Amino acid sequence: MKYVAIVGSNSKNSLNRVLANFLAKRYGSDDLSIDVLSINNLPFYSVDDELTPSQEVVAFKQAVKEADGVIWLTPEYNHSIPGVLKNAIDWLSRVDKVMISKPSLIMGTTPGFLGTVYAQMHLRDILFALQSPVLMGNDTLVGAGHQKLSGSDDVTDESTIAWLDTVMPNFKACVESH
């Protein structure tokens, strides 16, 4: 089984990238690979370019197409997802529409208390519009991420790890059922 993790941030010190790398290390195995994709080099989506996209876009879309499931890790800016993440989603939603029927899991971490709850609600709405089934009831809202994650791609908070140990098998079951 293969997942891709899409980090919705272009920040060099992204807490969500730390969380994605932790997921790949902790849950990756001989039976499951989790590839953390970068969206930093994707050009701005334009209808003028959608039929002849750049190589970065082609490779990104192909990686998502080949995955059995997508893990979305989003920060929250102004109660929504970052523009860089929306841009990546726009590329995925056009022409060959690789997200249709592709299971999704949404996560997010932030230094704030609410752990990206508004961004996740917005992302869920967008993914529903793309016809991507989203695993419900497994909201992973990591508030105070700067205290619960380390710079060495580790989650240091035991309750967060315990929650992830519950969510990841639930996502596997979701992916297997689609």
Image (tube, grey):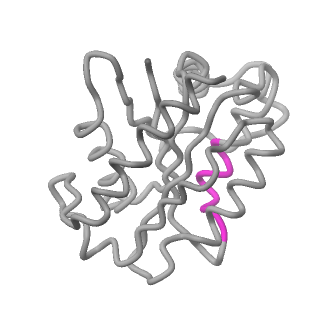
Q: Main secondary structure of the magenta part?
A: helix
Q: What is the residue that sits farthest to the bottom in this orientation?
A: 113
85 is within the stretch colored magenta: yes
Q: Is residue 131 left or right of residue 66?
A: right
Camera-nearest residue between 163 and 151: 163
Residue 101 position (above or below residue 10): above
Q: Nearer the viewer, residue 36 or 173?
A: 173
Q: How many marks?
A: 0
* Residue 38 quadrant: top left
Residue lying at 53% horizontally and 47% vertically, measured from the top left: 72
Dividing the picture into quadrants, the one containing residue 159 is: bottom left
Q: From the viewer's perspective, tell me whether residue 131 is left or right of residue 62.
A: right
**What residue is at 78 percent from the left and 27 percent from the top?**
50
Magenta-highlighted residues:
80-88
In this view, 17 is above or below 15: above
Name the image quarter holding the N terminus: top left
Between residue 58 and residue 169, name the one nearer to us. Answer: 169
Q: Is residue 122 left or right of residue 95?
A: left
The question of residue 114 being in magenta is answered with no
Q: Residue at x 42, y 66 (%)?
A: 109
Residue shown at 33% from the left, 71% from the top: 145
Place of residue 30 in the rendered image (x, y in percent of width and height, measured from the top left):
26, 16
Q: Quadrant of the C terminus?
A: top right
Question: Residue 129, how many percent across, how many down?
Answer: 83, 44
Residue 85 screen position, x and y as percent: 60, 51
